[in-house]
Image: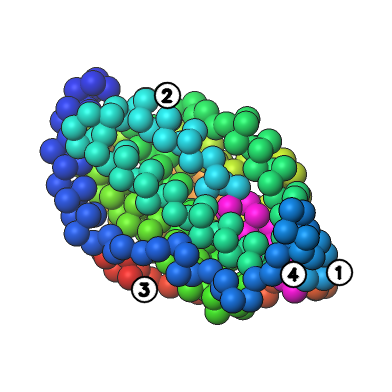
Amino acid sequence: MTHPHDLLTELEPTVARLLDRHLAAAPDWFPHAYIPWSEATDYDGPLDGTAWQADQSGLPQAVADALTVNLLTEDNLPSYHFEIATQFGRDGAWGAWVHRWTAEEDRHAQALRGYVHARRCVDPVTLERLRMRHVSTGYASDHASLLHGLAYVTVQELATREAHRNTGLACTDPVARQLTTRIAADENLHMIFYRDLYTTALEWDPDGAVAALADVICAFDMPGTTIPGFRQRALRIAASGIYNLDVHRRHVLQPLLRALGVMTRSGLGSAGEQARDRIGRHLDELRRKAERSSRLFDRLREAAPVALASRPGPSMSYDERGRT
């Protein structure tokens, strides 16, 4: 088994190669270009504009919830930067990646906030108070090792891609679809970086990497779970089909496990085999839970159709450059 410091050193050439590939693939884009400024109006306050009212949104509550959760999650970037910089370091190729990733992620909150303010999608006062509470609380991971940290960001980036993409599809606003598609493409490139890096880690320490992945998958939570009122919002988001257990299983975990070759890999020791069995049992349990939840959500949609969005279509595919 490779020690954490040794693994950082062993993986650094791969990080450098993947960073070069990422920089060649990642397009320049500008948050201000995705905001419908011409349709925006001043708010109440120093500019003596119009106060926000709930009927200005025009969005199903589940879509407003998803935009709020996605934005507040992106807002916590300072904590995420600290976490990965502490684990990966700030020097060499690792440090270059950490800073580049942070710079790219920062655009997401800028663009989403501009959009929801211009469209008056959510109460801006409530949103800012939630941001202050969420960012003041911060985010701290409990990753037991470097492999756990890498496994988590690999799963999380793909989950975040799906959350942004499905929010845009449920929104029906073509401007929102353009913006969320752009953000989802960024998240896809980040996922590709981490997925391919984890593929290398699997070669260095197969049993340890599969065990870490099993730990992460079986206890996975999105980083936005500490947002005040998250559970109620998450229920509406799940019922709408934007992000729920079925999406997580079919469009995040299963494609990722296929790409990594975890479930068909040969040559694992007993620890790796046991971890793979755990993953298989977890997928089965997720399927059962998703089926039960689907029946519950059908009843919720019948009871409150206005509050929930229509289900997004099938997951779009992305190429290695993050294009749809």
Question: Gap between marks 3 and 4, in whole Å?
Answer: 28 Å
Label 2: which secondary element: loop
Question: Gap between marks 4 and 2, in whole Å?
Answer: 43 Å
Q: Amino acid at mark 2?
A: Ala
Q: Is tag 1's residue or tag 3's residue first in the polypeptide sequence?
A: 1
Label 1: which secondary element: helix
Q: Are marks 2 and 1 in contact (CB under 8 Å)?
A: no
Which span of residues is magenta-colored?
57-71
Q: Is 148 included in the stretch rendered in magenta?
A: no
Give the mark toward the camera: 3 or 4: 4
Q: Amino acid at mark 3?
A: Thr
Q: Amino acid at mark 1?
A: Ala
Circle 1 packing at 10 Å, graded few (<14), some (14-19), many (20+), is few
- Residue 135 occupies quadrant: top right
Q: Is tag 1's residue or tag 4's residue first in the polypeptide sequence?
A: 4
Give the mark toward the camera: 1 or 4: 4
Residue that mark 1 sits on = 303
Q: Is tag 3's residue or tag 4's residue first in the polypeptide sequence?
A: 4
Work out which quarter of the rendered image holds the C terminus and state it.
Answer: bottom left
Q: Amino acid at mark 4?
A: Ser
The mark found on residue 144 in the picture is 2
Label 4: which secondary element: loop
Residue that mark 3 sits on = 324
Q: Is 62 included in the stretch rendered in magenta?
A: yes
Question: Gap between marks 1 and 3, in whole Å?
Answer: 35 Å
Residue that mark 4 sits on = 57
Q: Is 93 displayed left or right of 237 in the figure?
A: left
- How far across and how far down the image is residue 24, in percent? 19, 59
Residue 277 visible in rendering: no
Identify the residue at horizontal 30%, vertical 54% (top origin).
192
